[in-house]
Image (spheres, rainbow, N blue to C red):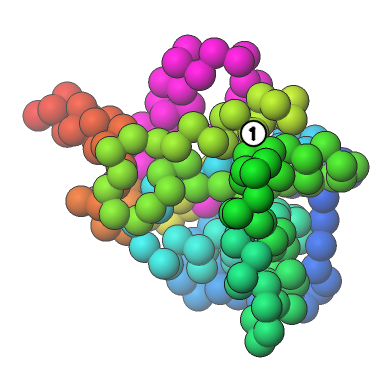
Amino acid sequence: MKHKTIQTELGDKVPRRGNKFTEWLGIFVLWITGWRVVGAFPNISKAVVIGAPHTSNWDAVYVIAAALALRIKVQIMAKDTVFKPPFGGFMRWLGGIPVDRSSSHGVVHQSVSAIKSNEQMFLGLSPEGTRSGAKEWKSGFYVIAHAAQVPILVTVVDYGKKEIRFADTVIPSGDYQQDYPKIVELYRGVEACHPKLMSAPLQALRKYNNVNKN
């Protein structure tokens, strides 16, 4: 039986990694910090996993702890220079995939190729692209998911409830302007570590909620 901090079950198609020790380590970090993992997790082998709001380095701590506790393998594209010694081995262990930013194919093309060439792959991305109040989300996550023909798993990092929450799975229609508001809406009511640094789309949701409360 899973620890009470884990209220999510994974199916047999989901890419897995880790062992009893890494699972215990993730659960311990969540437990000692008072966080938990909740929400229905789709039994799929490939997805683009987005996480928000991203306003602090602590976000990564809780997300990594959740991934370890679930024994789920989420890979992240990073510039190839960080895979050189002495940290190269550690980055690969974390599930990092080196990207050549000087390549004419670009990051999106390399990401799509990586997803298509693997039988199982969850690619993690931050749609805000920065911790310092982005004016808008980067559409790369959507372009990659649509081109690779995989769903978008919307993950919420909520400091108000101390939850890593799997909100929903969105199948990209190909019309970003139509799907984008639906995705952002899944973050309504979320609290960030530093609310003032939330991206503009999430700030707008927060202001709307505050107006309605008053």
Say if 205 sits above or below 82 in the image.
above
Say if 153 sits above or below 5 in the image.
above
Q: Which of 126 and 185 is in front in this view?
A: 126
Note whether residue 38 is visible.
no
Q: Residue at x 82, y 50 (%)?
A: 15
Location of residue 13 by image quarter: top right
Task: Specify the farthest residue to the left.
Answer: 214
In which quadrant will I find the N terminus? bottom right
**Left or right of 188 on screen, residue 138:** right
- Residue stretch in magenta: 164-190
Say if 162 sits above or below 210 in the image.
below
Q: Residue at x 69, y 61 (%)?
A: 98
Residue 134 in picture, x, y percent from top left = 31, 44
Note whether residue 21 is visible.
yes
In which quadrant will I find the C terminus? top left
Location of residue 76 by image quarter: bottom right
Total marks shown come to 1
Residue 29 in picture, x, y percent from top left = 56, 73
Disc 1 designates what residue? Answer: 144
Say if 29 sits above or below 132 in the image.
below
Residue 74 in picture, x, y percent from top left = 70, 54
